[in-house]
Image (cartoon, rainbow, N blue to C red):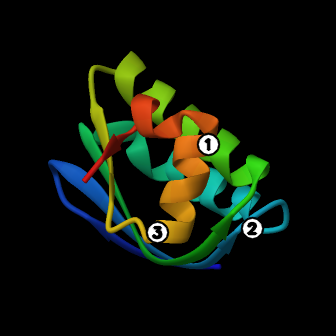
Amino acid sequence: MQIESNKTEEGLYLKLSGRLETSTAPKLQEVVDREIVKVNELQLDMEDIEYVSSAGLRVLLAASKKMKKKDGHMIVSNVNDDVMEVFEITGFNEILDIR
């Protein structure tokens, strides 16, 4: 998985590509934990994500909870049909702000 990062004073924009799974989820977790400290908005662009495993879902849920805890907001954008199906089956479409 590749992560392109763009951080401003207001937020952090991460463009993700590849597979968000057991071997790559820790990389995203590390970036999120390190970079969200001083931002109020986290946006994850998932247009180029091919697959999300349960490990990837855990990272997304943890990031969302961390942002809510600090009165911030997380947006997941450009989700393809395959990944959206995973979100719908797991109920994550009700938990995450997907645009």
Q: Amino acid at mark 1?
A: Ile
Give the distance between the C-alpha atoms of the residues marked 1 and 3, in whole angstroms: 12 Å
Observer-nearest residue: 99 or 74?
A: 99
Residue 22, percent across and down? 83, 60
- Residue plotted at (55% across, 63% down): 83
Residue count near mark 2 (Cα–Cα under 10 Å), binned few <14, some 14–19, many ≥20: some
Of pointers 1 and 2, the one earlier in the residue sequence:
2
- Residue pointed to by mark 3: 81
- Could you say whether the residue bearing mark 1 is in a helix, strand or loop? helix
Q: Amino acid at mark 2?
A: Thr
Residue count near mark 3 (Cα–Cα under 10 Å), binned few <14, some 14–19, many ≥20: few
Observer-nearest residue: 18 or 6?
A: 18
- Residue pointed to by mark 1: 89
- Residue 45's place in the image compared with 17, above or below, is above
- Residue plotted at (28% across, 34% down): 73
Of pointers 1 and 3, the one earlier in the residue sequence:
3
Q: Amino acid at mark 3?
A: Asp
Residue count near mark 1 (Cα–Cα under 10 Å), binned few <14, some 14–19, many ≥20: few
Residue 41, percent across and down? 25, 43
Q: Quadrant of residue 36 in the image? A: top left
Give the distance between the C-alpha atoms of the residues marked 3 and 2, in whole angstroms: 21 Å
Drawn side of residue 11 relative to residue 37, left or right: left
Q: Which mark is residue 24?
A: 2
Choose mark 1 or mark 2, whichever is in front.
Answer: 1
Choose mark 3 or mark 2, whichever is in front.
Answer: 3
